[in-house]
Every structure is written in C-alpha cells, then in structure tokens.
Amino acid sequence: MKIPKVAFFDFTSCEGCQVEIANFDQDLLKLLQVVEVVEFREIMKETCSEPLDIAFIEGSFSREKDRERLQKIRQRANLVVAYGSCAATGGINALKNHKPDYKYKVEVYGADATMPHLETQKALPISAAIPVDLAIPGCPVNRQEFVRLVSDLLHGKAPTIPNYPVCMECKKKENICRYELQDTCLGVVARAGCGALCPSNGIPCEACRGFVDNPNLDSLVELLIKTGMQPAYAMAKARMFTANLVEE
C-alpha cells in the first residue's frame, strides 16, 4: 500500500502550530508510521517538488506575491488543509485589518516600518487565495483533534469540526461560569473542540478557535458591556482572534 506523502508549509504566522506538531511526542511517532513527511521546515531541511497527497498550510495570506506559491502548492496536492486559526480565518494577524496601514507598521516594526519587504495587505485565510479542503482552527492546533482529523482524511472519512460553543464543554466539566465569578468570557459564541482548556484552568475563553456558525455577536458585546467594559473595548475583545469575522 502506498504511504501518503505530506508536507507542511508556512506563510504569515508565528509558526507555533508547526512547533506544536513537532512536540506531539508519541502521537507524532504514530503519525510517521502512516505518512511520509517530505517537507517540514521546523524539523527537517529537505524540500521536494513532487506531487503530494496532503499539503498542510499554516499562517494567513497577507502578501499578494504569496498567491503564486500557494497556487503551486494547490496544484501539487490532492488535499490542502489550512491548519491553525491564522490559516483558517486570518487569526490574530487580522487585527491589523482594523488599523491604518502606517499605524500597525510603526507599532510592530518601529524605525524599520518603511522597509519594502515588510509591505503587506490585509491578513486573510488561505481560502482567500486557493481552494481549501479542510480548515482546522486553534491557536495553536489541538494535537488530539489534529491527529483525529488526519486519521479521518487517510481513511476517507468526512472530518468534522465542532460547531457548538465552549460553554457546552464547560458544563460537561462542571466548571463555574466565568460570568458567575464576575469575569468575562467569549465561550458563549466560541467554537468548541479545545475541551474548555482555558476556563478549566481559571482563564476566560478568548475564542482562539473562532466562532460557531452564525454567532450572536450583538448579544456577546452587550454581555461584555454589562460586566463594566466600555463598548469600544468590548468590540475589540470580541475580535481578538476573530478580526475577519467581526465588523467595526
């Protein structure tokens, strides 16, 4: 039986999702038994130009000149998986889309802000440049979910991503609601699948996996305002990881 060839590529990102996969320990060893990794910049120096069964892409699409490289990857791969919130929705990178070009450059790069190689456009999901077969949310990706979804792809099953809020996972774990503790939380509209990791450890959900389909954002902002937040800050809070999903 032919072993599927897979490759990992990165665009505008911190490469944290690649690091997370590299740290899979035993799960990574199990994965390497059923696939052949032919390119993965974080852990190997080899590259390839041959056809791929699966191309995993991390990072957002933020430079028009990256479109050609993405198109070449798409042509080579039977399946393209955008993994991590930056690749899936634009992620935290998309916060720049709500600021004037000059402002975010100066804030990030300081005196180097005018250097030509730093020229970028809006931070968008990979699907804005090429067709994507599967988008896996998370900042970084959840290792158990990643392995499960890759297994589904390899077995010809239709992968599924949870489309219910983190609140449901909190209830299963019998966590005390952050709002009951006079705190804030985005779990009411955040996409589950993380096991309510942050609220279970006393940290409000920041919706790093994006939102469920058709979230009631007006109600979320209203709820945040009721905790004492100023309206502008409540809106900013709502789009920390979901800036492409929340309008001004």
Image (tube, rainbow, N blue to C red):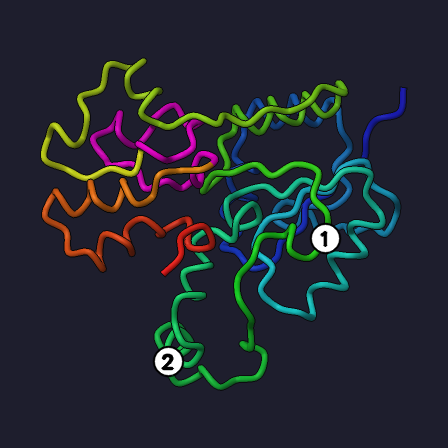
Q: Is residue 209 shown left or right of residue 166?
A: right
Report which residue position mark 1 lands on.
130
Which of these two is toward me, 53 or 30?
A: 53
Q: Residue at x 43, y 25 (%)?
A: 164
Which of these two is toward me, 13 or 172?
A: 172
Residue 41 at x, y = what percent?
66, 51
Magenta segment: does it hold 243?
no
Q: Residue at x 59, y 41 (%)?
A: 83
Residue 6 at x, y = what percent?
76, 37
Q: Residue at x 40, y 57 (%)?
A: 247
The amino acid on which the numbered mark 1 sits, given as a three-letter code, is Ile
Which residues make up the magenta segment?
188-213
* Label 1 neighbour load within 10 Å: few <14, some 14-19, many 20+: some
The amino acid on which the numbered mark 2 sits, given as a three-letter code, is Gly
Say which label, 2 or 1, has the lower sequence index: 2
* Label 2 neighbour load within 10 Å: few <14, some 14-19, many 20+: few
* Quarter of the figure that contains the N terminus: top right
* Vertical position of residue 100 compared to residue 97: above or below: below
Report which residue position mark 2 lands on.
110
Q: Is residue 113 shown left or right of residue 170?
A: right
* Vertical position of residue 137 compared to residue 167: above or below: below
Residue 195 at x, y = what percent?
38, 23
Residue 106 sits in which quadrant?
bottom left
* Mark identifier at residue 200: none
Magenta segment: does it hold 211?
yes
Q: Main secondary structure of the magenta part?
A: loop
- What's the distance in space between the residues labelled 2 and 1, CA to CA? 32 Å
> SS for tag 2?
helix
Residue 107 sits in which quadrant?
bottom left
> SS for tag 1?
loop
* Quarter of the figure that contains the C terminus: bottom left
